[in-house]
Amino acid sequence: MTTVLLILHLMIASALVGVVLLQRSEGGALGIGGGGGGGFMSGRGAANFLTRVTGGLALAFFMTSLLLTLLATRPTTSRSIFDPPASAPASSAPADKGAPAPAAQPGSPPAVPAPGRGGILDKLGPAEPTGPRVPQSK
């Protein structure tokens, strides 16, 4: 739905640009477009037609802009393939919120922080230090 509306929006935008460029210059445009004799669509009828078409395309452009904004802010139910499954198995022992975290063993990989939303980036741990280890004073 969003893709179809976005393609329609782009087509309306390009048609609006084309119709605006077809309109006759009224002067005051730094001499661009001349002001001389008959252009492609000169005359009063063509000016009224192009004005109405421009107004209709502008209205359609604003409406599709509003619809695209509403669709973008709507919560979606589709999930990414990187999200964990909804029925993730729970740990066998419930964690006590008041108890301190167990200390890491020397030589073991660093502890992975608790996932925020459960995405793939939340599961990545901190990078291993690449330089020499410096003794830390306690």
Image (tube, rainbow, N blue to C red):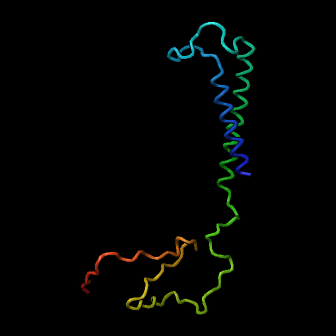
Q: Position of residue 61 (x, y in %)?
A: 68, 37
Instruction: Say which quarter of the image contains residue 108.
Output: bottom left
Q: Residue at x 69, y 36 (%)?
A: 12
Q: Position of residue 96 (x, y in %)?
A: 53, 90
Instruction: Say which quarter of the image contains residue 107.
Output: bottom left
Q: Residue at x 70, y 44 (%)?
A: 7
Q: Position of residue 36 (x, y in %)?
A: 60, 7
Q: Is residue 62 left or right of residue 27?
A: right
Q: Residue at x 73, y 30 (%)?
A: 56
- The vertical placement of 42 against 14, above or below, is above
Location of the C terminus (image quadrant): bottom left
- The vertical placement of 121 against 12, above or below, is below
**How many discs appear?**
0
- The vertical placement of 88 against 51, above or below, is below
Relative depth, front residue between 131 and 4:
131
Relative depth, front residue between 83 and 65:
83
Q: Position of residue 114 (x, y in %)?
A: 51, 79
- The vertical placement of 121 against 113, above or below, is above
